[in-house]
Amino acid sequence: MKQLPEDKKVYFLSDAHLGSRLVENPREHEAKILRWLDSVKADASAIYLLGDMFDFWFEYGSVVPRGHVRFLGKLAELTDSGIEIHFFTGNHDLWTFGYLEEEVGLIVHREAKDLYIGNKRFYLAHGDGLMLESEKAFRLIRAIFHSPFCQRLFRWIPPQIGQELGFRWSMKNREAIRGIENKFLGEEHEHAVLFAKKYAETEDVDFFIFGHRHILLNLQLPKKSRVIILGDFISIFSYAVFDGENLSIEIFE
Ligand SMILES: [Mn+2]
């Protein structure tokens, strides 16, 4: 149980979808997240990026995707200065195989984490793995995306085609969910809330924090737990900050 240093804070942000073809001005999108990183670096002891920071990210053995150099450079600057940056893989950027760790200094997480920050207990996840048993199609796609065998096959597709497929898939995927994205479906239908309620029956978690849904939610459960869904950094520009005692949601600029 590591104590949070005095005057230091921990930040949580997700779903920037950098590189998305649905963003009109990609350079400004990237510049905005750089401004955010600059605004938090003075008092951040750790930053948790909870998934889908990239709209599509697939690393090859010796070649990485074009773009995002300012963002990656800024992350490296912060990790070099001693700030812990945790990168949870989302469902758009899980294909990272060492580059972000070795070159950028990120701490990559492929699974949900249940951990203490200061004396509060957190459960952190992107949230795409929380679908219900009945959602067979989603579960199958997720299994394919995570399969090392399929990843190896994808690597054999020439990168210019593989990248094009990836960005198109991502755009179609986000267009397809436009109806439900950014809209709270109710406590009984949000997977993250259902999951948190069940988990909290036996585990004493203070804060559940998820991304993925592109909605802002700050929900108190019957006992002490709170469920936070972070919004996003593509249309809402929201994030959460923890000061050792309290957690609040903020909107940037
Ligand atoms: Mn997602």
Image (cartoon, helix red, strand yellow):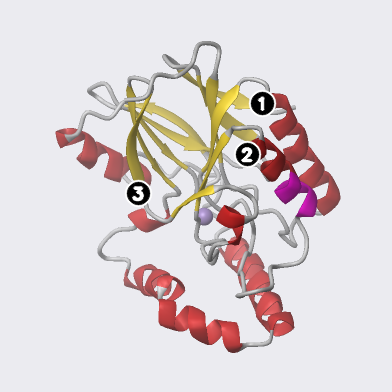
Residue position for label 1: 40
Between the residue at mark 3 and the residue at mark 2, the CA separation in whole angstroms equals 33 Å
Q: Nearer the viewer, residue 104 or 122?
A: 104
Q: Position of residue 169 (x, y in %)?
A: 61, 73
Between the residue at mark 3 and the residue at mark 1, the CA separation in whole angstroms equals 30 Å
Q: Position of residue 179 (x, y in %)?
A: 56, 55
Q: Nearer the viewer, mark 3 or mark 2?
A: 2
| SS for callout 3 | helix
Q: Nearer the viewer, mark 1 or mark 2?
A: 2
Residue position for label 3: 191
Q: Main secondary structure of the magenta part?
A: helix
User: Residue at position x 22%, y 28% from top?
Assistant: 204
Which numbered disc, 1 or 2, marks the residue that appears first in the sequence?
1
Q: Nearer the viewer, residue 68 or 102?
A: 102
Which residue in the rendered view is the most extreme toward the top?
6
Q: Which residue range is magenta in the image?
A: 69-73
Q: Say what amino acid the circle numbered 3 marks.
A: His
The C terminus lies in quadrant:
top right
Q: Say what amino acid the circle numbered 2 marks.
A: Thr
Residue position for label 2: 79
Query: Quick check: marks 3 and 1 in contact, CB under 8 Å?
Result: no
Q: Say what amino acid the circle numbered 1 marks.
A: Val
| SS for callout 1 | helix
Q: Position of residue 41 (x, y in %)?
A: 67, 27
